[in-house]
Image (tube, rainbow, N blue to C red):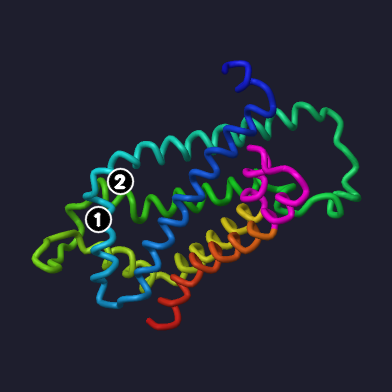
Amino acid sequence: MSNFLTVAIGRKFIVSISGIFLMMFICVHLGANLLLIFDDSGELFNQGANFMATNPFIKIMEPVLALGFLIHITWSFFVSYKNYQARPVRYAQSNAAYSSSWASRNMLVLGALVLAFLVIHLWNFYYVIKFNYESMLSTEIDGVVMHDTYTLVAGLFKSSVGYCIVYIIGGLLLGMHLSHGFWSSFQTIGFSNKIWLSRLQFIGQIFAILIAAGFSVIPLYFMIKF
């Protein structure tokens, strides 16, 4: 097992498996966030946020998710560094655009930018909810008292055009990262024949567009309506 992790295919396998795990989380997270635009009273989003905060399974998955992010980020940088070491002489770049997509040639840059957005996102929301919850308002829905997470999240979108723009850019960068990362992850774990690869590349493009549009529509909703 240790030898597997030290060779190139082993390192790529770890990046791919952690990437697929994170893509599943992204779908769940986006679904929960879209509740922001379906109910301006905030009840739907608050109920969803309260479920995520109190469900025992979700609590167990939180450290697993954090580990998934840590593994994906650190191993991605490690793989990129090893690839760089293996090329002491730079290749000619004139025909690069014809052999690979821009996203595939800049996955590390896109990943780093997505990471920067993630840090901003966690600081504005996750940190407050988990470690500064005394400052949050409370609300009661169907007899259950819970944190008014909607006011925290929607309030920032309503009050800061700058953050809305940052959020949109983050969504677009994530979509660009996924446009290559989706099919590449499945290719690494074995879906590499021509038929499956072409299908996965098509599905990956659709998936990337939906994710980018989904995350972008939330701040756009608040910018237009409020």
Residue under label 2: 58
Kindly identify which numbered label has been placed on residue 51.
1
* Disc 1, SS: helix
Image location of residue 82, percent across then percent down: 70, 28
Where residue 182 appears, as percent x and y from the top left, is: 62, 50
Q: Residues within 10 Å of mark 1 (few under 14, many from 20)?
A: few
Mark-to-mark CA distance, 1 and 2: 9 Å
Disc number placed over residue 185 in the picture, else none: none
Q: Position of residue 173 (x, y in %)?
A: 59, 57
Q: Is residue 198 magenta?
A: yes
Amino acid type shown at disc 1:
Phe
Look at 67% across and 38% down and name the residue there.
190
The residue stretch that appears in magenta: 180-201
What is the secondary structure assignment of the residue under circle 2?
helix
Q: Is residue 202 left or right of residue 61?
A: right
Image quarter (top left, top right, bottom left or bottom right) of the N terminus? top right
In the rendered structure, does residue 27 fall within the stretch colored magenta? no
**In the image, what residue occupies the spot 39% across and 50% down?**
122
In the displayed orientation, state which residue is furthest to the bottom: 225
Q: Earlier in the sequence, mark 1 or mark 2?
A: 1
